[in-house]
Amino acid sequence: MAQYLVTGGAGFIGSHLTDELVRRGEQVRVVDNLSTGKRQNLAQHPNLDFIEGDLADLQVARRAVTGVDYVLHQAAIPSVPRSVLDPIASNRANVEASLNVLVAARDAGVKRVVYAGSSSAYGNTPTLPKAESMAPAPLSPYALQKLVAEQYCQLFTRLYGLETVTIRYFNVFGPRQDPSSPYSGVISLFISALCDGRAPTIFGDGEQTRDFTYVANVVDGVLRACHVKDASGEVINVATGGRISLKELFENVRQLVGANVDPLYAEVRAGDVKDSQADISKARRLLGYEPTVRFEDGLQKTVDWYRASQLTVA
Ligand code: UD1
């Protein structure tokens, strides 16, 4: 049994990682400042080792990593538009806190840090799918911050011998993704709007594409990355390898929900990437990763979850 720390463990992806680790009988600690995460996401683990604190404070990071073997660093302000509006707050959460986690992990003798990188680092690459060997081209403060922290991880591996792996996420979705903010992930916004009979907004012409990835696939990739020896120091895409347009996404959700509502259209969002699709051959080769939940099945599970949680609230 190993000791894991999930930073941002009360958030959407972090809480799914926590669930799986608990299911496997591992020891888990969560640190979260509850800025976007919620205690409710961990209600199924009443005895969980939970630290409420902000990793931008080095003392919190040091306390959190004490006695830890593996750090799964998920804590972030995970939004492109929020970073465009407030790059300083976003940098503090995404870069400064990440540096604190790395310093604390190095000093505490942590075995490995697996970092939640982002596909946004690629920007508008001329070719698809996007492979890790392509030069990054961040288009937003968020994308740059995720890239900086990822490069800090690689630097810590080279300079101090701290093992790190960056998993680049591609538009992760699933149960518990919070639809309550305008900065929320698009699938959570579309489902919650259509379930309420409201019209979702499509920014731009709706022809932009994304490699939407169901959360269980990401959990699998991240947990594999803890233990594969040759993965240390690497950056690895984890996604499905496909892509669909926002218009297609809207149609899919509309059919699943059974709503008869048309979308509204608004200006394209500043910092938005046009197309995103992952080359997942490195994850296959290095991690033995294979996406196990297809987009359509993941979307169905997500719609079912939103419906069930609506019933609970009502
Ligand atoms: C980006 C990153 C992703 C990161 C995420 C965190 C890319 C390719 N991906 O996702 O790695 O984890 O930020 O937020 O850069 N949209 C609408 N209507 C809405 C909301 C969004 O049309 O109500 C559109 C957006 O303009 C965008 C797409 O849907 O084109 C996806 O948006 P969103 O879910 O916010 O994620 P990204 O910005 O793609």
Image: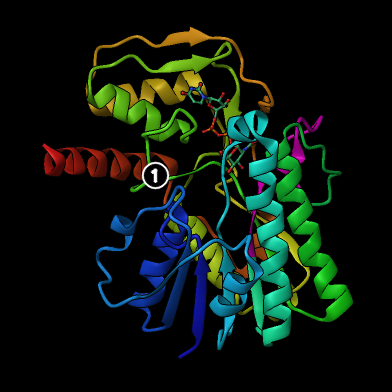
Residue 96, position as x, y percentages in the image: 71, 57
Q: Is residue 129 visible?
A: no
Neighbours of disc 1 within 10 Å: few (<14), some (14-19), many (20+): many
Q: Quadrant of residue 305?
A: top left
Vertical position of residue 29 compared to residue 308: above or below: below
Position of residue 53 in the picture relative to residue 24 (left or right)? right
Q: Quadrant of residue 158?
A: bottom right
Verify whether residue 13 appears in magenta.
no
Instruction: Classify the position of the N terminus by image quarter.
Output: bottom left
**Which of 134/57 is in front?**
57
In the rendered view, would you say 202 is above or below 6? above
Does 121 appear in magenta?
A: yes
Image quadrant in which the C terminus is located = top left
The image quarter in which residue 75 lies: bottom right
Residue 116 location, x and y as percent? 61, 57
Residue 126 in the figure: left or right of residue 302: right
- 274 w.r.t. 287: above or below: above
| Place of residue 201 in the rendered image (x, y in percent of width and height, measured from the top left) | 44, 16
Q: Quadrant of ligand 1?
A: top right
Q: Which residues are magenta?
A: 115-131
- Residue beneath disc 1: 177
**Vertical placement of residue 16 versus 189, above or below:** below
- Callout 1, which amino acid? Gln
| Between 3 and 215, the one nearer to me in the picture | 3
User: Residue 60, percent across and down?
Assistant: 57, 71
Q: Is residue 208 left or right of residue 282?
A: left
Residue drawn at 46 percent across, 35 percent down:
184
Q: Residue at x 42, y 83 (%)?
A: 26
Q: Residue at horizontal 36%, vertical 39%?
A: 299
Q: Is residue 183 left or right of residue 117?
A: left
How is the protein colored in the picture? Answer: rainbow
Q: Is residue 274 visible?
A: yes
